[in-house]
Image (cartoon, rainbow, N blue to C red):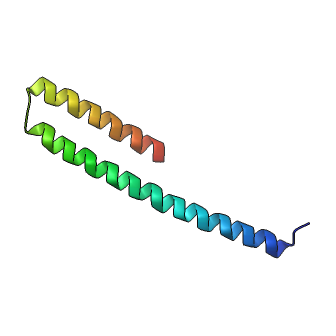
C-alpha cells in the first residue's frame, strides 16, 4: 500500500499535469478567438448584407459553443 507521501506526490503530479493542460486549452481558445475576429472583419468587407449576416451568425454560434465548452 502506498504511503501518504507517495499519494501526495501523485496528487501533485496530477495537479501539474492539469495545469499544463489548462494552459494548452487556453492557448487554443485564444487562437480560435483570434481567427473568429479576423473572419468577422473579413466578412464585414464583402458580400450582401444577408450573406454577411449568415456568416457572422455562424461565427457567433461557434464562439458561443466554444464558450459553453469551457464554462
User: Going 63% across and 65% down the picture, which residue do you hit?
Assistant: 15
User: 5 above or below 32?
Assistant: below
Q: Residue lying furthest right in this view?
A: 1
User: Going 14% across and 42% down the picture, which residue do you hit?
Assistant: 42
Picture quadrant where residue 46 is located: top left
Q: Quadrant of the N terminus?
A: bottom right
User: 65 above or below 70?
Assistant: above
In the displayed structure image, the side of residue 17 where residue 44 appears, left or right: left
Q: Nearer the viewer, residue 62 or 68?
A: 62
Q: Residue lying furthest top in this view?
A: 50
In the displayed structure image, the side of residue 42 where residue 37 appears, left or right: right
User: Going 40% across and 44% down the picture, which residue do you hit?
Assistant: 67
Residue 17, percent from left and from top:
60, 64
User: 71 above or below 3?
Assistant: above
User: Going 29% across and 36% down the picture, which residue do you hit?
Assistant: 60
Answer whether residue 71 is visible to the viewer in this image.
Answer: no
Count up the numbered dots. Answer: 0
Answer whether residue 39 is visible to the viewer in this image.
Answer: yes
In the displayed structure image, the side of residue 64 where residue 42 appears, left or right: left
In the displayed structure image, the side of residue 14 where residue 40 appears, left or right: left
Residue 34, percent from left and from top:
27, 52
Amino acid at each position: 500500500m502506498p504511503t501518504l507521501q507517495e499519494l501526495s506526490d501523485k496528487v501533485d503530479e496530477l495537479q501539474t499535469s492539469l495545469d499544463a493542460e489548462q494552459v494548452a486549452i487556453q492557448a487554443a481558445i485564444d487562437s480560435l478567438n483570434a481567427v473568429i475576429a479576423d473572419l468577422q472583419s473579413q466578412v464585414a468587407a464583402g458580400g450582401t448584407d444577408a450573406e454577411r449576416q449568415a456568416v457572422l451568425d455562424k461565427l457567433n454560434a461557434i464562439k458561443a459553443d466554444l464558450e459553453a465548452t469551457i464554462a
